[in-house]
Amino acid sequence: MFEFVLNLPAQLAAYFGSGYVAGMLVGLKITLFVALSALFFGLILSLILASLELSKWRIVRWITIIFVTTIRSLPEILVVFIVALGLPYLYALIMGDFPDISIFSLGCAALALIYSSYASQTIRGALLSIPQAQWESGKVLGLNNFQIFLRIILPQMWRHALPGLGNQWLVLLKDTALVSLIGLHDMMFVAEGAFNATGKPFTWYSIAAFMYLGVSLISQYGQAKLAHYITHYERA
């Protein structure tokens, strides 16, 4: 143990000079880009799914519920494989050629689909928590349904949904590790390559773990600040 401590500075210098740490920083950028892209499109899809689940047409509600339940019931890695590997193959069978879509886009689409299947339920609950009188008040002011939703309902909905969406963002951040399995050079992909090259899994997976931990802590801090900001007037 004492010898390990004495050799630690030299080992760290060797790791940082090997180029793999720089590669993992590049992988971290890709991981964050994938996560933020999936979050953006996932939130849009979540709003659509939540609205469809609250539709006045029963057939629309049931189709949406079946779709969301199916995605939530499947292992997340299976959803990634179906979207990133299965759908292009199905397209090739029908059209005769594989689509010109990058692995990055397919990975983002899969993660956005997974995120939206959970976030849509959070948004749906937040929408249901807003009194119907808010809609009626908007109509009295002469606003149409879209204006009421955009100006009155949506700001209140975010305040109710933020805690749940923040937790689901942390899950999404961890789920980005799945895209390494379809060949995207994210942080886990680079860590796997460094392990195979050096034969030291604990070192590289520990570095990846600390990177994930750092991003998660920053995310939680940002979420707390955002929640404090948007609810400030309610406490005043």
Image (cartoon, grey):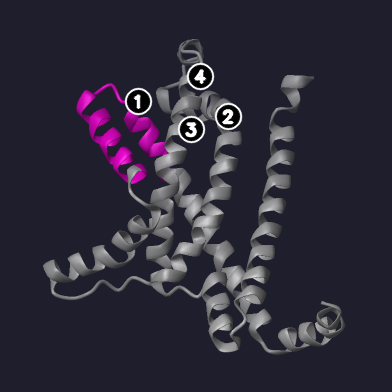
**121 to 92, vertically: above or below:** above
* Labels 3 and 1: the sequence-earlier one: 1
Q: Which numbered dot is residue 155?
A: 2
Gap in Å between the C-alphas at discs 3 and 4? 11 Å
Going 71% across and 59% down the picture, which residue do you hit?
A: 214
Q: Is residue 181 magenta?
A: no
Relative side of 196 to 68, left or right: right
Snapshot quadrant of residue 65: top left
Three-letter amino acid code at disc 1?
Answer: Leu
Q: Percent x, y for residue 102? A: 38, 72
Toward which corner of the image does residue 67 lie, by quadrant?
A: top left
Is residue 45 rendered to the left or right of residue 130? left
Viewer can see residue 93: yes
Q: Where is residue 37 in the image (x, y as percent from the top left)?
A: 50, 57
Amino acid on which disc 2 is placed: Pro
* Inter-mark Cα distance, 4 to 1: 13 Å
What type is the residue that disc 3 sits on?
Answer: Thr
Residue identified by numbered label 3: 122
Mark with earlier residue (3, 4): 3
What residue range appears in magenta?
A: 45-72
Whether the residues at callouts 3 and 4 have beta carbons within 8 Å, the answer is: no
Q: Where residue 211 sits in the image (x, y, percent)?
A: 67, 64
Which SS class for mark 4? loop
In the image, residue 5 above or below residue 157:
below
Residue type, numbered disc 4: Ser
* Residue on which disc 4 sits: 129
Q: Residues within 10 Å of mark 3 (few under 14, many from 20)?
A: many
Which label is found at residue 54? 1
Q: In this view, does 211 lie to the left or right of 46?
A: right
For mark 3, give the secondary structure.
helix
Residue 74 position (above or below residue 20): above
